[in-house]
Image (cartoon, helix red, strand yellow):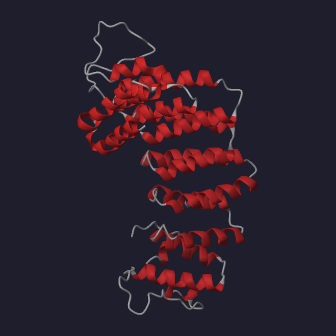
Amino acid sequence: MPRVTSNNSDDEAQLYCEKSEWQDITPIPQYDGINPIAPIFYTPEYKDATEYFRAIVKADEVSERVLQLTYDIISMNPAHYSAWQYRYRTLVALKHPLDVELELMDAFAIKFLKTYQVWHHRRLLLTALRSSAPSPLSIASKELAFIIRALSTDTKNYHTWSYRQWLLAFFDDEELWEGELPYVERLLETDVRNNSAWHHRYFVVWGRVRAEGEIDVGDVLKREIAYTKDQIALAPNNPSAWNYLRGILEHTKTPFNSLRTFVELYSTQTAPGEEDIVDLDNPKPGPGAQLPCAPALEFLADIHEEMGGEQTKKAIEIWKSLGNEYDTMRKKYWEFRVKEALSV
C-alpha cells in the first residue's frame, strides 16, 4: 500500500506492539471467521496498527497518541473511513488546532486525490473552521488556492471538483465566486475537452444566475452561446462543448432550432469555403475539421424531433446514419431512438 511519511518517522519501522508507550493496551485482532474463504493478507505494520485501533475505539480513548495511530493507519490505507472519523473526533475533543490539521492533510489530498475520505475530512475541518475562525473568507480563499494545486495534478478528478463546488456554495461569498469563471476559461484554453471544467462552468454561471435574480438571463445566455460556439469551432468533435450548449438551451427553455444555422455548418460533409460570407455569430469549422461531426448530427436530429410532425422522419434518418456510419459505438442507442420515434 502507498504510504505518506509520518510525523513521527523515528518510530515508523517499529510496530505498536514493540512501543513502550502502548504496553497498557491489549490489541484486538480482526475476526475473520473459523475458515475464511478469501482472507486478506495485510502487511504486518497495518495488521498491528489496526489491532491497536480496535482497542482504543473499544476503550473510547481520545489522546495525542490516538492522533499518531490514526495518522499511521490512513497513511497505509487512506480509505479507512473509521480511522478518519475517529481522528476527527479526537481532534475536536483535544481542541487541536484545525488549521494545523488542514495543512498536515495537504500531502494526503495531493497523493490520494481519488480517495473520497480525504476530501470528506477536509470538509469537516472547513465546516468547523468557518464557525470559529476570525476570518472565514481568508480560510476559504486559501483552500481554493490549494484546490488549484490539487487540480494541477489531475484536472478531471471528480472528488476534487465536487469539493470545490461544495466550498463555493458553503461559504457563498462574492469574492470567491468572482475568480471562478476566469479560472475555468484558463483550464479550457489548456484543454478544451476538459469535461469537468465545462461542468464547473455550468455550475458557476447558472448557479449564480439562480442566486442573483437581478441578472439578465438573456444577456448571460447570449454570452454563453457565443463562447461555446467559439470553442466548438476550435474542436468540432468535442462532445463536452456540445453538451454544454444543449444544457444551457434546456435550462433557459430556448428552442434548439434557434441555433440551426450554426449546427448545419458542422453537420454537412464539407466545410464552408473561404469565399463564404463571414458570420461572426456562427463561426465555421476550420479547414482541418472532420465533418460531419457526430455531436452536430445528434443536435440536428434533436432539432427535427423538437419540431415534430414530418420533421421526425429527418431525425430518424440522422439517427440511422449515426448508428451505421458516424457513431457506431452507440449503434444500439441510435436504434433505440429510431424505435422510440416510430412507436410514437
User: With respect to residue 327, does 45 lie above or below?
Assistant: below
From the top left corner, tell me how far across and down residue 87 is, in percent.
61, 71
Which quadrant of the rendered structure holds the C terminus? Answer: top left
Which residue lies most toward the left here? 325
Up-down: is 38 above or below 273? below
Q: Residue at x 59, y 25 (%)?
A: 220
Identity of the residue drawn at 46% across and 67% down: 5
Q: Position of residue 43 (x, y in %)?
A: 39, 79
Q: Nearer the viewer, residue 308 or 240?
A: 308
Seen from the viewer's position, the closer of residues 290 and 44 is 290
Q: Nearer the viewer, residue 315 or 145?
A: 315
Instruction: Please provide percent x and percent y for residue 229.
Output: 43, 23
Q: Quadrant of the N terminus?
A: bottom left
Query: Would residue 218 appear left or right of 299 to someone viewing this image?
Result: right
Front in this rendered view, residue 110 or 315: 315
Could you tell me residue 336's position as x and y percent?
35, 43
Residue 7's place in the image compared with 22, above or below, is above
Residue 95: quarter of image = bottom right
Instruction: Work out whether residue 94 can be spotted.
Output: no
Toward the front, the furthest residue is 343
